[in-house]
Image (cartoon, grey):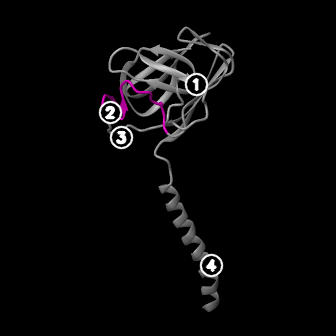
Amino acid sequence: MVRIRRKLVPLVTIAAVAIAARGAGAQGYPFSQRGVTQQDVAFTSIEVRYGRPVARGRTLFADSGLVPYGKVWHPGADSATRITFSHDVIAEGRALKAGEYSLWLIPRGTGPWTMIFSTAAHVFHTPYPGDGRDALRVDVQPERLSHMETMAIYFPVVNRDEAVLRIHWGEWAAPARI
């Protein structure tokens, strides 16, 4: 009997530690999961890496919302959203060199929103690196769509030599023609 107990004690201890570690790991999961979207358009690879915040019943876009109108906002969570172009592109009719950029928006209650491509690619989501690092600013017309609980960046339209990149969260989306 003593021999059996001596053999069982280490096994029970290992099992208890494994169960405790598994439970503790679940508590460490981030609230916003990471996402990647990739699209090839006319021999150009476009890749977006971003954190996907969840609305969780919050007021998102408003003067006093989570994302205040008229202020620079990083569309994502944690590290700034990064977009990479393998070749030079035209974004909303304006030239943008191949490379990696962080992506920012200025939402507004009325009128177009401003999409910013910043050369400061590897930064945290706050603070905004400043307009001195902007590679390009373009105006985009926001769209009111069905509710998107977890923010998504995707390509709803892809043609032979152009695509639409859409940033969609809550009931609002910011599309950019590339």
Q: Is residue 144 above or below residue 37?
A: above
Quarter of the picture containing the C terminus is: top right
Q: What separation in Å lies between label 3 and label 2 (alpha carbons)?
A: 13 Å
Element marked by disc 3:
loop
Q: Residue at left 61%, top 35%?
A: 122
Q: What separation in Å lies between label 4 and label 2 (alpha carbons)?
A: 54 Å
Question: Residue type at mark 2?
Answer: Gly
Q: Is residue 92 above or below residue 131?
A: above
Question: Residue type at mark 1?
Answer: Arg
- Which mark is on residue 56? 3
Segment tinted magenta in the rendering? 60-77
Q: Is residue 35 magenta?
A: no
* Residue position marked by numbered label 2 in the rendering: 65
Task: Name which of mark 4 and mark 2 comes first in the sequence.
Answer: 4
Residue 118 vs residue 154, the one in the foreground: 118
Q: What separation in Å lies between label 3 and label 1 (alpha carbons)?
A: 33 Å
